[in-house]
Image (cartoon, rainbow, N blue to C red):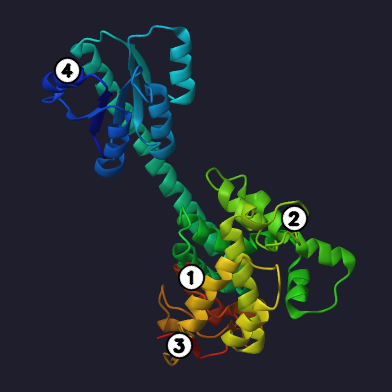
Amino acid sequence: MSSRILLVDDDENVLAGYHRVLRKAFDLDVALGAPQALQAMEHHGPYAVVVADMQMPGMNGVELLQKVREGWPGAIRLMLTGNQDQRTAIEAINQGRVFRFLTKPCSPEDLAAMLTAALRQHQLEHAERELLDQTLTGSLKVLTEILSVVDPHAFGRAEIIRQRAVQIAAALGMEPSWEMGVAAMMAPLGFVTVPSALAAKGRSGEPLSVEERDTLRRVPEFGAQLLGRIPRLESVAQIVRYQHKSYAGAGYPLDDVKGEAIPLGARILRALDDFQEIEERRGSRLVAMEQMKLRRGWYDPRVLQALEVLLVDSGQAPDPAVPRAVAVKDLEPGTVLAADVRTRGGMLVAAEGTRLLPSHVEKLQNFARLIGLAEPLYTKG
């Protein structure tokens, strides 16, 4: 965690004075004007605290701190100004979201006290974000484990799509990258709201009633509504909501969103979901890609091109390693299943492509002991 401070002013003498007095107590850098400050943020950051003078030529302090807030939201922002106008203070607080507003002349002692308070605030906010990240990550892990046990087919398939989606998102420069992996794993979440028999009926291709078809079409919306209740997953919820929307705007949800307005993650999921379905049915990646190319307006051309490079032109996978037969007692977390695992009666317990978590291993061992599994099991590698 950074404890560095950036002090910005257009007066070189002011900067030199503050730097001389405060450098022993703080890790302090100075910038002569807003352009130099932004360059320092870009190349020498991160900074815990940014202190900006209000009256600077070209870009004033409010405008600078607004850019800092947008580009480096973790930095605590302070405003120094000789202008005691109330409107300036309001602008600084509302646009730059400043932590403290100080007027010139400001004694080194007062500024030092404010810098100490700002560093303390930065530590508190950093700890809060770290705790939230750990809580969110842990909660998502538990949720994924539970859902993979409840619906092994959907979440085993989601793991395969997740691996591919993360690679395509990276190739297309998607930010933030973590959203793609979470969205791919949470894409089938809406299935928990519909009867399992209906989900199985839809997967098997059996004829559906109008009401059944409409319910299955709305599965992404059901999933998005569930995810939307979790803080910081609003963008992930939007990806899940639009995962079946065609690039030209057809499909669900029924709105006017199309093209680049559809979240990039949703465009990636749309292409990968169809690719996976065709590949499983036809047994060929080349056939899947050629069939998808004939569907005009269905997919983002950039996503389709990235998919072709990743999975077809590169000749990537299926894994060339011969599947390895293992006993249930020898399964370990991290192992990837090379074939579906079923009970002796034919019930699906875990799907091909599932990367086993501790909960999967425990589940398979319980099934083997209490009901019986069709052994041996097959894993990759």
Most foreground residue, 80 or 137? 80
Q: Earlier in the sequence, mark 3 or mark 2?
A: 2
Disc 2 from disc 1: Cα separation: 26 Å
Q: Residue furthest front?
A: 58
Residue tagged 3 = 327
- As measured in the structure, the alpha-carbon distance from the residue carrying label 3 to the one carrying label 2 is 45 Å
Classed neighbour count for the residue bearing mark 2: other residues with Cα under 10 Å, few (<14), some (14–19), many (≥20): some
In this figure, which residue is indicated by the disc labeled 2? Answer: 253
Dot 2 falls on a residue whose secondary structure is loop
- Left or right of 146, for residue 37: left
Q: Amino acid at mark 2?
A: Pro
x and y percentages locating residue 197 in the rendered image: 77, 71
Q: Is residue 129 above or below residue 267?
A: above
SS for tag 4? helix
Mark number displayed over residue 163: 1
What residue type is disc 1 on? Gln
Secondary structure type for disc 1: helix
| N-term mark: 4 or 1 | 4
Pinpoint residue 41: horizontal percent, then vertical percent: 30, 38
Residue at the image point whose x is 64% and y is 55% from the top: 262
Give the image location of residue 340, x and y in percent. Answer: 57, 83
Q: In the picture, residue 79 is in which quadrant?
A: top left
**Cα–Cα gap, marks 2 and 4:** 60 Å
Which tag, 2 or 4, sits closer to the chain's start?
4
Q: Which mark is residue 13?
A: 4
- Judge whether residue 237 can be spotted in this image: yes
The type of residue carrying mark 3 is Ala
Q: Nearer the viewer, mark 3 or mark 2?
A: 2
Q: Position of residue 15 (x, y in %)?
A: 19, 21
Q: Nearer the viewer, residue 139 or 116?
A: 116
- Amino acid identity at mark 4: Asn
